[in-house]
Image: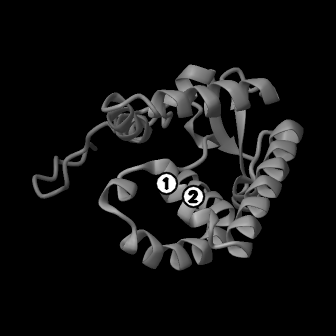
Amino acid sequence: MVAPANNYAPPKSEVADVVPGDDIKASRGSRLGASIIDSLIIFLPMVPAYMHAIPLIARAAPDAQRNVLAIWALIASTGGWFYFGLLWMVIMLVVNGILAYRNGQSIAKKWLGIKDVRTDGSRVSFARIFWLRNVLNGCISLIPLIGSFYGLIDALFIFGPAKRCVHDYIADTIVVRA
C-alpha cells in the first residue's frame, strides 16, 4: 500500500554546494581561524611598539604622516619594543617555514588540525607554499588599487563550492583536515 503524499511536509531539494570528496576538506571556519591565529601570533608582539609610536606619529609633520618610511622610522625609534617585535616576527616566520616544509602547516593550522596538500592529495612542496601561496599572493596585493580588490576577491572565493581561495587555485592546493 502506497502512503498518500503529505501536503504539509517540507519541500525536498538537492543541495548544490556539496562537492564529492568534500568531507576531507577543512571547514571555512577552521581556515579563517587559522589565518587569524597565525596573524595574532606573528604581529601581536609588535603592538607595544605601535602604542609607543602613536604619540610620535601624531606629533609628526603632516607630510611625514603620509610617508610610510617615515612612519616605520618612528615605530623603529621606540627602541626595544620594535626590535623585540621584529625578532619575534622573524622567529615565527622561520618556525612556520619549517612546519610548512615538513607537513604543509603553519602553527595555527597544526593546532586546528588542517594542512595544505596538492589537489591530487600529494604532499605540497615548500617552494609551492612559499612562492605561489605567499610571495606571489603578496606581490599581487601590493599593486595599487588592484591589490585591495584582489585581497577581497581572494577571501570571497572560499564561499565557492570548492572551498578554495584564489591563492589555492594559483598554487594548485587545497586545505584538508590533517
Q: Which amino acid does label 2 sit on?
A: Ala
**Along the line of sight, which residue is nearer the eye, 148 or 19?**
148
Residue 91, given in percent of the width and then of the height, sits at: 83, 56
Tell me the residue that label 2 is attached to: 73
**Whether label 2 touches label 1, CB < 8 Å:** yes
Residue at horizontal 30 percent and vertical 32 percent from the top? 145
Residue at horizontal 16 percent and vertical 53 percent from the top? 6
Left or right: where 28 falls relative to 11 = right
Q: Is mark 1 on a helix, strand or loop?
A: helix
Left or right: where 86 falls relative to 25 = right
Q: Is residue 156 above or below residue 82?
A: above
- Give the crowd class for mark 1: few <14, some 14-19, many >=20 residues within 10 Å: some
Residue 137, given in percent of the width and then of the height, sits at: 54, 30
Tell me the residue that label 1 is attached to: 70
The image quarter in which residue 151 lies: top left
Left or right: where 82 falls relative to 31 = right
Q: In this view, does 157 lie above or below 11?
A: above
Identify the disc placed on residue 141: none
Residue that extends furthest to the left in the rendered view of this protein: 7
Q: Is residue 74 at least partly visible in the picture?
A: yes
The quadrant the N terminus occupies is top left
Residue at horizontal 36 percent and vertical 35 percent from the top? 153
Residue 39, given in percent of the width and then of the height, sits at: 60, 59
Q: What residue type is labelled 1?
A: Ala
Q: Is residue 29 at least partly visible in the picture?
A: no
Q: Is residue 86 above or below residue 148?
A: below
The alpha-carbon separation of the residues under discs 2 and 1 comes to 5 Å
The image quarter in which residue 115 lies: top right
